[in-house]
């Protein structure tokens, strides 16, 4: 005897056991929890970054003229115009000395040693200095060729030497160092090799240097290793 499955009245086979209909669909996934605070923070960070970039681009176009040091100026030394040049820099808010004040800068002294390439700020300068104050004097020298180095320049450190003239004292006078480390305040060379030099020395020795210089018995020797 054959066993056969009964069909439904509409001719379709009966449903198999198991999930069917709505039960066979995927399980519902709970919606993601949105965090409005984090989203707002992300937006703010993006906007802040864009704003900072825009400001940098805009500020990079703002240029100002400033004073840049081109030669080393020792602490306590006058800052000459020859040691300054004009440079264009971005306006970053730092109080660099504007180029239009260069004449005033030339009347001030370096508070610290200024190296070439330094952008000058006001705290680097001083209206007075201990280098030329109580106990110090400036002595002007008019020297001939051979009495000073040809490349002598301001801020150099020199020895001031007494060189007696030939025949003075029947040869009894001897050379001697009057100042072991005098700083050159200014120097200008002439065509013949000599020039006018101003040195800063102790007041105790200044009269003797001036006297010997008037008779042409002064020579200067540079000390390159001393700053």
Image: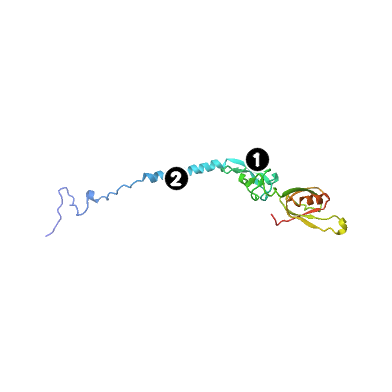
User: What residue occupies the far top of the structure in this picture?
Assistant: 100
Residue beneath disc 2: 45
Camera-side residue: 206 or 83? 206
Camera-side residue: 182 or 7? 182
Total number of numbered discs in the rendering? 2
Rendering coords of residue 44 (x, y %): 43, 43
Q: Residues within 10 Å of mark 1 (few under 14, many from 20)?
A: few
* Residue at x 23%, y 50% (from the top left corner): 23
Q: Residues within 10 Å of mark 2 (few under 14, many from 20)?
A: few
* Residue at x 49%, y 42% (from the top left corner): 51
Q: Nearer the viewer, mark 1 or mark 2?
A: 1
**Which disc, if any, is residue 76?**
none
Please give left or right for residue 59 compared with residue 143 in the image: left
Please give left or right for residue 105 compared with residue 49 in the image: right
Counting residues from the start of the chain, the first of labels 1 and 2 encountered is 2
* Residue at x 62%, y 44% (from the top left corner): 122
Gap between marks 1 and 2 measured at Cα: 42 Å
What colour scheme does the image use?
rainbow
Query: Judging from the image, what secondary structure is the residue with disc 2 in?
Result: helix
Residue 82 appearing in the image = yes
Q: Quadrant of the C terminus?
A: bottom right
**Which disc, if any, is residue 101?**
1
Camera-side residue: 203 or 4? 203
């Amino acid at each position: 005897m054959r066993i056969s499955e009964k069909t439904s009245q509409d001719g379709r086979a009966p449903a198999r056991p198991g999930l069917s209909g709505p039960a066979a669909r995927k399980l519902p996934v709970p919606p993601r929890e949105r965090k409005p605070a984090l989203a707002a923070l992300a937006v703010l960070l993006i906007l802040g970054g864009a704003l900072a970039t825009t400001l940098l681009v805009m500020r990079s176009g703002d240029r100002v003229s400033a004073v840049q040091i081109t030669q080393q100026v020792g602490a306590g030394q006058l800052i000459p115009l020859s040691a300054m040049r004009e440079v264009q820099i971005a306006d970053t808010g730092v109080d660099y000395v504007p180029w239009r004040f260069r004449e005033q800068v030339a009347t001030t002294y370096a508070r610290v040693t200024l190296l070439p390439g330094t952008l000058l700020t006001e705290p680097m300068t001083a209206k007075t200095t201990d280098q030329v104050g109580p106990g110090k004097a400036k002595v002007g020298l008019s020297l001939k060729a051979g009495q000073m180095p040809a490349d002598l320049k301001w801020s150099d450190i020199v020895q001031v030497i007494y060189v007696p003239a030939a025949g003075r004292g029947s040869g009894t006078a001897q050379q001697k160092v009057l100042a072991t480390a005098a700083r050159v305040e200014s120097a200008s060379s002439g065509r013949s090799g000599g020039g006018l030099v101003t040195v800063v020395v102790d007041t105790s020795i200044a009269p003797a240097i001036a006297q010997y210089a008037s008779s042409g018995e002064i020579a200067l020797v540079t000390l390159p290793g001393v700053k």
